[in-house]
Image: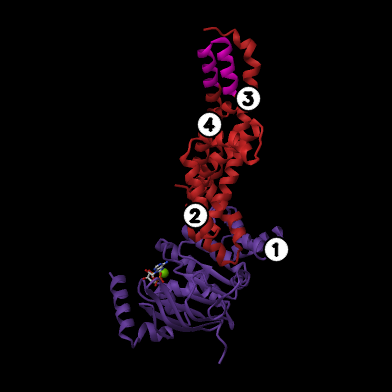
Amino acid sequence: MQASAVDIRKVNKYYGPFHALKDVDLAIPPGKVTCLIGPSGSGKSTLLRCINFLEEYDSGEIRIDGQLIGYEAPGRKMSGRKLREMRRSIGMVFQQFNLWPHMTALGNVAEGLVRVRGLSKAEAQARAAEALAKVGLADKMGNHPARLSGGQQQRVAIARAIAMEPRLMLFDEPTSALDPELVGEVLNVMKTLAGEGMTMVVVTHEMGFAAHVADQVAFMEKGELVGVDSPGRILHHPEDPRIQGFLRTYHERNSF
Amino acid sequence: MEWSILEQYGPALLRGFGVTVLCWILGTIFGMALGLVIALMQRYGPRWLGWIIQAYIEVIRGTPFLVQLFVLYYGGPLVGLRLDALPAGLLGLTIYGSPYFAEIFRSGFRAVPHGQIEAARAIGMAEPTIVRRVLLPLGLVSALPALVNFSIILTKETVILSIITVPELMYQVSRMSTETFRYLEANLVLALFFWALVETISRVGRRFEARITKHLIERT
Ligand SMILES: Nc1ncnc2c1ncn2[C@@H]1O[C@H](COP(=O)(O)OP(=O)(O)OP(=O)(O)O)[C@@H](O)[C@H]1O
Ligand SMILES: [Mg+2]
């Protein structure tokens, strides 16, 4: 069997007394798309954010290509420098885009290349322009985020992440803040990325995307990872009653 | 009214105004710088440092500038701090303004959406770089109106420097009135100069604000 790109083992996370992640086990295969689904508040974002240690987990292990993230050894925190080094190769895309509003689209994408990767400004801008062209925004490079639609902003955010040449991309509900007619353009960029063999973990409520693009789907509820399987088996023939219940509600809400 | 005395006192008044503007500019710059350092230490420093800073802020904000200046200028030599009037006045202004500026910066920083800082962390940016490239530019934008406002308030605090004999405008105006008994004319001159100064600052401030927020406002 191939080694996992991300290996999550017995991960627990508490917010004060609240147990947000309960002994979560999950293997993310390299070059594949894993979708995380589940009801609101089930811990999907928390788990995703633990993968790049934006959220600290309290016990268990998360390994990126075999290397433990966040801790030197269980219980001993990793140095800031080492954590930053690991984060360089993990791209993240947020629900709210989180672009830097005082920089142009090009500036947003070039920023990390200059300040983190240490590229010259010219080199960074050339690569940033390439990344923007890839997400279909070659003609919007000079725009500030306020002058871009939601879908365009999210594509800039994706370009910002891929320009860093990550080995792994994390998406937290990348289309949830978008008007329905703008969802497609973002999903298309993600599909292209998946087609190129990028390892992706996607928290999503877009069951269509999960059904058609995911290689595996993981279902979470109340901080527990209830099941992981192929999209066909999770979305069409779920065995667990909790997944059945979730999908029933989803179908009821989305039919008219 | 008797305006002919201006012929005699005009140059002194102008010099006084120059000193006032100088005190205001330097006091504002140093006060802002100290306030910024305080705000950053509050945000990133250890908790015990936060408590010390909070105490400093309470003390300075809770006492009149006049009292602070007296303590500094007349009490300073007792502990070996012997300053001339002008440096003492500038130091006083700096200290007096710093907690207000610190609070303005603090709330400016809090207005920066956390997600934009997380986005920087997620690509592996170091914290000092995040401060320089994200927190400061965005925090300053939200802090700007309050910064301009407080620096206008500070213009008027400069008159207190006259009591430790800094030869600023108020000092010259007092001299002119006691020597000529032309209190009304003297104080009208004072008002006119301050009005011009404040008006200029707020105009420049508004223009500056419009320029730096140009890209941040969504097109409607
Ligand atoms: N910073 C926090 N402090 C306290 N509780 C939190 C915090 N962040 C999340 N939680 C709680 O942890 C639980 C899981 O949150 P999380 O955001 O991971 O859910 P989610 O599955 O992503 O939900 P959604 O689909 O609504 O985004 C929720 O009950 C939430 O209230
Ligand atoms: Mg979430």
Q: Main secondary structure of the magenta part?
A: helix
User: Which residue is painted at 37% across and 73% down in the image?
Assistant: A18
Q: Is residue B24 left or right of residue A35?
A: right
The residue to which callout 4 is attached is B157
| Nearest to N terminus: mark 4 or mark 2 | 2
Q: CA distance from mark 2 to mark 1?
A: 41 Å
Which numbered mark, 4 or 2, is in the foreground of this view? 2
Please provide percent x and percent y for residue A30.
Answer: 56, 82
Q: Colour of chain B?
A: red
User: Which SS class for mark 2?
Assistant: helix
Which span is picked out in magenta?
Answer: B169-192
The residue to which callout 2 is attached is B51
Same chain letter for marks 3 and 4: yes
Determine whether B193 is above or below A190 in the image: above
Contact (CB < 8 A) between labels 4 and 2? Answer: no
The residue to which callout 3 is attached is B167
Contact (CB < 8 A) between labels 3 and 2? Answer: no
Q: Is residue B170 magenta?
A: yes
Q: CA distance from mark 4 to mark 2?
A: 28 Å
Contact (CB < 8 A) between labels 2 and 1? Answer: no
| Nearest to N terminus: mark 3 or mark 4 | 4
Q: Is residue B53 left or right of residue B167?
A: left
Disc 2 residue type?
Answer: Trp
Q: Tell me the chain of label 3.
A: B
Q: CA distance from mark 3 to mark 2?
A: 38 Å
The residue to which callout 1 is attached is A119
Disc 1 residue type?
Answer: Leu
Q: Colour of chain A?
A: purple
Q: Tell me the chain of label 1.
A: A
Q: CA distance from mark 1 to mark 3?
A: 53 Å
Q: CA distance from mark 3 to mark 4?
A: 14 Å
